[in-house]
Amino acid sequence: MRFRNPYNELLKKFSKKGIKYLVIGVSGINYYAKEPGTMFSTLDCDVLVKPKRRNIFSALKILEKNGYQLEANGEPIVGVDFWLAKKIIEHQAVIVSKKDNALRIDLVINGGRIPYSEWEKSKKEFIVDGVKVNVGDLKHLIRAKENSNREKDRKFLQLYKIQLKEMLKTTK
């Protein structure tokens, strides 16, 4: 069973443009949910992008073209170019993109201290409303949360330990 994803149109544009990406974080975990009651609440969609200049540049241009406001470290980004894409890679910056105070996509270069190549090798493809969506492998998604060393991730893992274990069983 699949559920309406407000980010689906944007992910479709990413795929159409050939952007190398994977949905990670809680949004990624939700693709493994078998029913609405097993989904987790999240405020954003974390998208891991392959750390290549053209790839990041293209992703930012699509976000910009689709009305998303971009920022890094709380500062607005105005004017996307290759220099900016290079700096994002160098600093492993997280780009926060917001639209209409409702949709938020975080573009990340580093997914839980797991190299992009490892994420890509084990990615899963989900078809949602005819759109192929690349999603991180559930084991990697959980490992990235463990690696993050953030209090909110430790609490998430502790609170949903049993549910995540069940999800892992059903993905084999």
Image (spheres, rainbow, N blue to C red):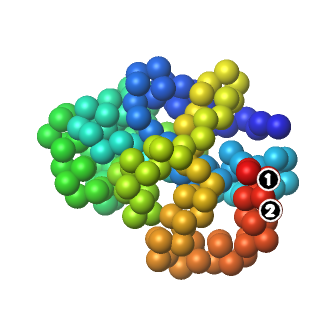
Within the image, what quadrant is residue 68 found in?
top left
Q: Position of residue 111 (x, y in %)?
A: 43, 57
Residue at horizontal 41 percent and vertical 35 percent from the top: 20
Residue at horizontal 41 percent and vertical 22 percent from the top: 17
Within the image, what quadrant is residue 74 found in?
bottom left
**8 lies above or below 168:** above
Q: Position of residue 125 (x, y in %)?
A: 61, 35
Asked whether, in this view, residue 119 is left or right of residue 161, the answer is left
Which amino acid, mark 1? Thr
Q: Position of residue 44 (x, y in %)?
A: 56, 51
Within the image, what quadrant is residue 41 found in?
bottom right
Viewer-nearest residue: 144 or 67 = 144
Asked whether, in this view, residue 98 is left or right of residue 154, the answer is left
Q: Secondary structure at mark 2?
A: helix
Viewer-nearest residue: 143 or 62 = 143
| Residue 166's disc number | 2
Contact? badges 1 and 2 (CB < 8 Å): yes
* Distance in Å between CA atoms under marks 1 and 2: 6 Å
In the rendered image, the quadrant that contains the N terminus is top right
Q: Which residue is mark 1?
A: 170
